[in-house]
Image (cartoon, rainbow, N blue to C red):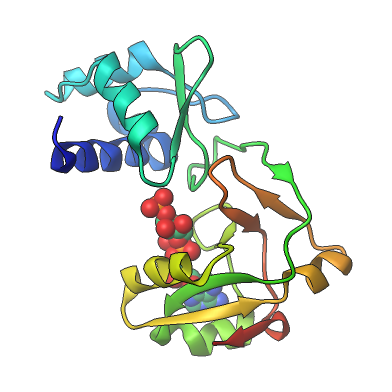
Amino acid sequence: MNSKQANETSKFLSFVLRHEPQAIGIELDREGWADVDALIAGAAAQGRELDYAAIASIVEGNDKKRFALSEDGKRIRAVQGHSTQSVTVTHVEKTPPEVLYHGTATRFLASIQQQGLLAGARHHVHLSQDIDTAVSVGKRYGQVVVLRVEAARLHAQGVTFFQADNGVWLVNHVPADALQVL
Ligand code: HQG
């Protein structure tokens, strides 16, 4: 599988494992796990050739470690980023560093400064530990702006932070007064 095919297959896996498992007739359990055989069969029914080797290489080689296989290799899940309501992944609660970052587009800024950061269609607001990641996340939506989040202060005030298996920080909401534009 070349890198273009891997990228395209990774997008397909994100779509069915985070958002629309029903699109290929598979089910996810509460923790987001899907049966690998069912995934392969569901993909095949739509003319998409997928096998264990391809799945394993995407799980292993994915730039953001978006997916995980169970120890026995029979199940696969997305480690974060879900929108489907049938899944509630148990994330590890963790004390955040002093500051975290969120990259977004300038056109969202006025609304964010009023409402704070909202999870939108996903289950959480996504934050990163470094500015570079925030820049690449934000520029997906247009002219990028990076916000600095006073994570340690919010945590001290009782806000719960989680960290997904791939290092992404997750929180339910960031109030506007804990944000500064960089
Ligand atoms: C914005 C990708 C208006 C928010 C990335 C963002 C990330 C508001 C957009 C992961 C708002 C939601 C998540 C408010 C937040 N008013 N806009 N009050 N509050 N927003 O895609 O963080 O490749 O759901 O700033 O790399 O951009 O899929 O979240 O621009 O890690 O693995 O609403 O998705 O990872 O967009 O991206 P998203 P995100 P993957």
Front position in the image: 127 or 129: 129
Residue 181 as seen in the image, left or right of residue 19? right
- Residue placed at 50% from the left, 72% from the top? 131
Is residue 39 placed above or below 81 in the rendered structure?
above
- Residue placed at 38% from the left, 30% from the top? 60
Is residue 40 placed above or below 68 in the rendered structure?
above
Picture coordinates of residue 21, whole percent (x, y) = 38, 32
- Residue placed at 59% from the left, 73% from the top? 117
Picture coordinates of residue 50, whole percent (x, y) = 21, 21
Picture coordinates of residue 7, whole percent (x, y) = 23, 43
Picture coordinates of residue 148, whole percent (x, y) = 61, 79
Front position in the image: 149 or 41: 149
Q: Which residue lies most toward the right here? A: 157
Q: The N terminus is located in which quarter?
A: top left
Is residue 98 placed above or below 45 in the rendered structure?
below
Q: The C terminus is located in which quarter?
A: bottom right
Q: Quadrant of residue 2?
A: top left
Q: Quadrant of residue 115?
A: bottom right
- Residue placed at 59% from the left, 68% from the top? 118
Front position in the image: 52 or 34: 52
Residue 117 as seen in the image, left or right of residue 42? right
Is residue 22 placed above or below 95 in the rendered structure?
above
Residue 131 as seen in the image, left or right of residue 36? right
